[in-house]
Image (cartoon, rainbow, N blue to C red):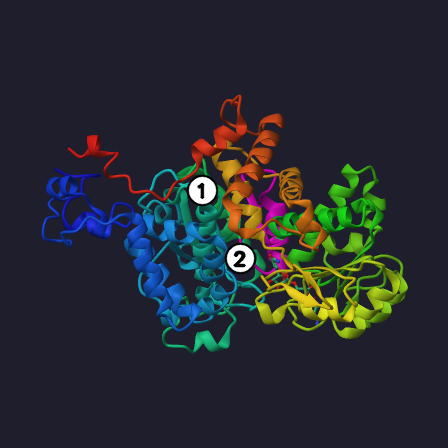
């Protein structure tokens, strides 16, 4: 007898079938497992207790990350039941901020392959490479060339940790079944000298090619995906800002693609802005925005924010006139000659300046948004300037990992004397100030891209649109209870993330049906339809006993 053609040690070596110490006597008998596993039959709860015991003995989060990835390599169900048992505790271990450290050391902590490595040396052969993947129905490829990993720069092949982690969040946060997910590193070399000289580095030891060469290889990849995995959505992640925006423009109207750094970040920050405006009893279009950073995250957000203001009744030009940006060379303004096309709508008439505080004093924004990758750039003077001109200054310090945040919540609340409405890109603990407790929210994309993913997965939507991210943002914002909103919390609690994402996915799925992008019939109950698609981290063998033959 066999399951999926496997028995004995083959079952134990397949992480999607392995139950470790939870096989029943009947399963052990049927599958030739007697003697290969201990004689007990443990419940999943007991297995979870052992996992937690072992995790508790690990000295650092990086060690816990390595342990959990190892668990995933052996027992996928137990891995996901662990993460989903306490998302607020485990998400920072499997994803941000631990993932940043895991990527920096990826070649050193590497144990076994996960996902696919597609190097530019395979030009002309991409379809053949994709066909080596064992699953035929792939619904999401998360692909990076690791040009800009988190705020850490060019990490080359070490960036593979990111697509692996991102796709785990599709499952852990929104219940997209793991067998449909394919992490991919598109190896275009690296300009990271340290890795080029590290004997344990796992990527091609070449510097990066020109944009034209890179884009023509990405063209081949995107077209090959359409043929090999026709229902697949391509999720671009952690490319450099310029590549991210250009590649999105290149494919978004032709294929089912999106870029999480551009659209996911934009969506989740927009959710925070919607709630900040709610606290102030204002609309988005009443606010004025100044960005520190005009890369992929900044531009994506500015564009989506403008679309949302247009939905509120402004013209596009009026919406853009409410958004200013500042980058490494100072304020984006009309006389700048170094701007990309996609930055120009935000370069208004203004005297050149490299002084952010002076820009605040002259532009008088109500909201500042840090997407600069540089920690500490929202100085005391910046926060004080914002507090001078605003009753409730909105301060979004989004760069990550933790030490890249433009300011900490403690700094924002202290320097603004408790007036700031604050969120960060990473999770900070609550802050006590003058007898009051403030709850800094985490503008983390994981509230939104897994939900968008679930909506696309379940409806088989043919395109990913900005309207989906705006609707996702509204859905996330609507799920913060008013008592928490009053304590300054802009985002829902992570402890209930699966339910939050199911509700968000349902609203986005409704939009996909309304806009004719869905490729399945519209169900009467869309929330129930989403629930029917949700992966549950429960062992299948016993229920699938009829298939044991
Ligand atoms: P990017 O590299 O495309 O852009 C960075 C921008 O910051 C550029 O415009 C650059 O000129 C500017 N910049 C750099 N140093 C500066 C300085 N000292 N002063 C002013 N501007 C400066 O990076 P990307 O993709 O836009 O990401 C930016 C940050 O946003 C990263 O730290 C990333 O971790 C964070 N992010 C946060 C997310 C979240 O969930 N909160 C999601 C995606 C990105």
The residue at the point 23 percent across, 37 percent down is 542
Q: Position of residue 135 (x, y in %)?
A: 33, 42
Total numbered labels = 2
Tell me the SS state at disc 1: loop
Is label 2 within 8 A of ligand 1 (CB to nearest ligand atom)? Answer: no
Res. 406 visible in picture = no
Residue 289 shown left or right of residue 397 in the figure: right
Assess whether residue 244 is covered by the magenta stretch: yes
Residue 147 drawn above or below residue 474: below
Q: Which numbered circle lies on residue 1?
A: none
Instruction: Identify the magenta region.
Output: 237-261
Residue lying at the far front of the rendered structure: 435
Vertical position of residue 73 compared to residue 504: above or below: below
Left or right: residue 321 compared with residue 147: right
| Relative depth, front residue between 214 and 11 | 11
Q: Are marks 1 and 2 in contact (CB under 8 Å)?
A: no
Distance, label 1 to label 2, CA atoms, is 37 Å
Residue 325 at least partly seen: yes
Ligand 1 visible in quadrant: bottom right
Q: Is residue 257 magenta?
A: yes
Q: Secondary structure at mark 2?
A: helix
Mark 1 or mark 2, earlier in chain:
1
Q: Position of residue 298 (x, y in %)?
A: 69, 57
Query: Which residue shows up at 18% across the image and 39% down it?
Result: 5
- Pick whichever, 82 or 99, lies toward us: 82
On the image, numbered disc 1 is attached to which residue? Answer: 175
Question: Quick check: 161 above or below 16?
Answer: below
Q: Which mark is residue 213?
A: 2
């Amino acid at each position: 007898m066999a399951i999926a053609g496997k028995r004995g040690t083959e079952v134990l070596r397949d992480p999607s079938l392995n139950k470790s110490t939870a096989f029943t006597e009947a399963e052990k008998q049927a599958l030739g497992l007697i003697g290969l596993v201990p004689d007990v039959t443990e419940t999943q709860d007991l297995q979870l207790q052992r996992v937690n015991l072992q995790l508790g003995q690990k000295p650092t989060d990086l060690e816990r990350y390595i342990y959990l990835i190892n668990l995933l390599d052996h027992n996928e169900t137990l891995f996901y039941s662990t993460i989903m048992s306490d998302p607020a505790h485990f998400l920072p271990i499997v994803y941000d901020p631990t993932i940043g450290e895991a990527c920096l050391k990826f070649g050193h902590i590497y144990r076994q392959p996960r996902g696919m490595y597609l190097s530019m040396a395979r030009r002309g052969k991409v379809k053949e490479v994709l066909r080596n993947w064992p699953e035929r129905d792939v619904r999401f490829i998360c692909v990076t060339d690791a040009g800009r990993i988190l705020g850490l720069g060019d990490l080359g092949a070490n960036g593979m940790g990111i697509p692996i982690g991102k796709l785990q969040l599709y499952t852990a946060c929104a219940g997209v079944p793991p067998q449909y997910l394919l992490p991919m590193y598109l190896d275009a070399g690296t300009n990271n000298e340290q890795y080029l000289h590290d004997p344990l580095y796992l990527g091609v030891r070449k510097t990066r090619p020109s944009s034209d060469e890179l884009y023509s290889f990405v063209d081949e990849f995107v077209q090959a995906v359409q043929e090999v995995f026709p229902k697949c959505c391509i999720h671009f992640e952690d490319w450099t800002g310029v590549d991210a925006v250009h590649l999105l423009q290149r494919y978004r109207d032709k294929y089912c693609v999106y870029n999480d750094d551009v659209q996911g970040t934009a969506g989740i920050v927009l959710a925070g802005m919607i709630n900040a405006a709610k606290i102030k009893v204002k609309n988005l279009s009443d606010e004025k925005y100044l960005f520190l950073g005009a890369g992929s995250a900044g531009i994506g957000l500015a564009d989506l924010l403008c679309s949302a203001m247009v939905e509120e009744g402004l013209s596009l030009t009026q919406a853009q006139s409410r958004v200013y940006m500042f980058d490494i060379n100072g304020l984006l303004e009309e006389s700048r000659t170094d701007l990309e096309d996609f930055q120009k709508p935000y370069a208004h008439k203004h005297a050149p300046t490299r002084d952010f505080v002076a820009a605040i004093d002259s532009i008088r924004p109500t909201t500042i948004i840090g997407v600069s990758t540089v920690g500490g750039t929202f100085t005391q003077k910046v926060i004080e300037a914002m507090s001078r001109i605003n009753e409730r200054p909105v301060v979004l310090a989004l760069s990550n990992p933790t030490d890249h945040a433009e300011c900490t919540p403690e700094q924002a609340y202290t320097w603004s004397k408790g007036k700031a409405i604050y969120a960060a890109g990473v999770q900070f603990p609550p802050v006590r100030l003058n007898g009051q407790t403030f709850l800094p929210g985490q503008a983390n994309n994981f509230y939104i891209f897994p939900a968008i993913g679930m909506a696309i997965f379940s409806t088989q939507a043919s395109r990913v649109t900005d309207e989906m991210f705006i609707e996702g943002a509204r859905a996330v914002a609507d799920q913060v209870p008013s008592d928490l909103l009053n304590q300054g919390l802009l985002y829902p609690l992570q402890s209930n993330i699966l339910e939050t994402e199911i509700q968000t996915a349902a609203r986005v799925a409704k939009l996909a049906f309304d806009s004719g992008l869905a490729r399945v019939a519209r169900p009467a109950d869309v929330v129930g339809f989403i629930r029917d698609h949700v992966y549950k981290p429960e062992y299948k063998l016993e229920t699938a006993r009829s298939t044991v033959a």
